[in-house]
Image (tube, rainbow, N blue to C red):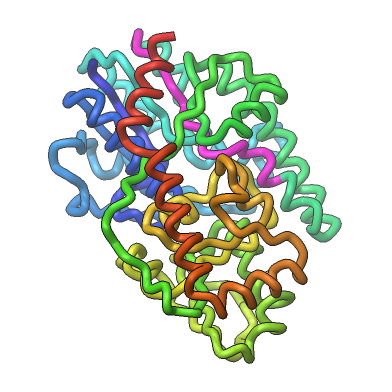
Amino acid sequence: MKVLHISNKPVFPTIDGGCVAMKAMLESLMQLTPDVDHVYIHTPRHRTDSSRYPAEIQRPLRHETSFIDTSVSLSGALKGLLTGKNYNLSRFHSAEFHEAIKQLVQEKSYTLIVLESLFLVPYVEMLRAVSNATIVVRAHNVEYLLWQQQAKDASFLKKWYLKHLAKTLKKEEVDGLNKTDLVWTITDEDAVLLRKTGVETKIATIPVAMETGTSQPDYNNPDFFHIGALNWEPNKLAVQRLLSTIWPWFSHSGSKLHIAGSFPEGNHFPQLPGVHFHGFVENARQFMTENGTLIAPILTGSGVRIKLLEALAMGVPCITTPLGAAGIKDAENVLRIADSDEDWITALTEFSGATELRQQAGEKGRAYIGKYHSFAIVKNLITESLAR
């Protein structure tokens, strides 16, 4: 089997949850077959660093063909309104990358092409025309829902525009996925949502592969942390909620709150006692094992929280919302779930004062990852989905 894996941003370095999920898929494919090529788009927000890539998997394109300027512009947004095309998707299409991928696919007879995320769907028609490969889209979440959720609390003009984005994205999401051979969702919940939305293509749930490893969290640490890219709206809203309505009631407890994540610039979060901002951390695993309990008061989004999976794999105790727990099987036995602000304050109080509780939660999380997210399990699920 010859596989081409295309991502809409560099997988290495793994600076956010999307990169972690893409890296896991790439590694899963490499366990399936030794003949895997990988190409990617790099953008102003996700710059390329080819030195961080394993040399055996990167299929080089000319540097200029893989760069796409996805910067938001007023003219681009207006053009999207006038043409009825979704501006979010159109920003990831370029004629240069289109031709470079076309040439690569014509040169090598791939049997499987995996597109990471909906944002690469605009290339499907070209791939279909020049290749007989099975074309799969890895759906990290149900994209239109993210914009639909953000529109709820937006001001009037912004609400109107976000609703427009959600509407056009929903149509293009369904139309685009229906042109592929197979969709791999990360959760069963997203598979159901896509089917209800009108996706008729075969859908299979392929969870993110994780290794449990041997790292040992410090269960004596009563602190809390949040980690995630702060240019992703669900993470930004979660931190805003945490600092505005939850932590102020807990800030004098003696526990500290550590907030880490790439792209912190432009966010004006309140400065509170006991809160420490770390920005991007090079070693996320070390950060997570050293700073107590992961807290993720997620309010929007779909799919699964990759940082939650990473934390569970390392035995880190986790507290999140019902939405944050989406995609986690038997979530109530693996995570502490808190919904209202009062629930959160109760959970923080309990976890800050009980070493045994933190350790029990961490051990359950590690066992869960071994049961549902091992590379062997994911490899088998991929094989089964392709054989259908």
Q: Is residue 246 left or right of residue 261?
A: right
Q: How many marks?
A: 0
User: Can you name the residue that lies furthest to the front here?
Assistant: 356
Residue 233 x/y as whole percent: 61, 57
Residue 207's place in the image compared with 346, above or below, is above
Residue stretch rendered in magenta on the structure: 131-147
Q: Can see residue 68?
A: no
- Give me the residue at 35% from left, 38% from top: 374
**Quarter of the image where the N terminus is located:** top left
Residue 79's place in the image compared with 381, above or below, is below
Q: Is residue 259 left or right of residue 251?
A: left
- Give me the residue at 56% from left, 90% from top: 254
- Give me the residue at 40% from left, 24% from top: 381
Q: Nearer the viewer, residue 192 or 86?
A: 192
- Give me the residue at 69% from left, 31% from top: 170
User: Can you name the residue that lies furthest to the right here?
Assistant: 156
Taking the magenta stretch, the answer to whether it contains residue 134 is yes
**Quarter of the image where the C terminus is located:** top left
Taking the magenta stretch, the answer to whether it contains residue 48 is no
Q: Nearer the viewer, residue 352 or 265?
A: 352
Residue 356 x/y as whole percent: 49, 70
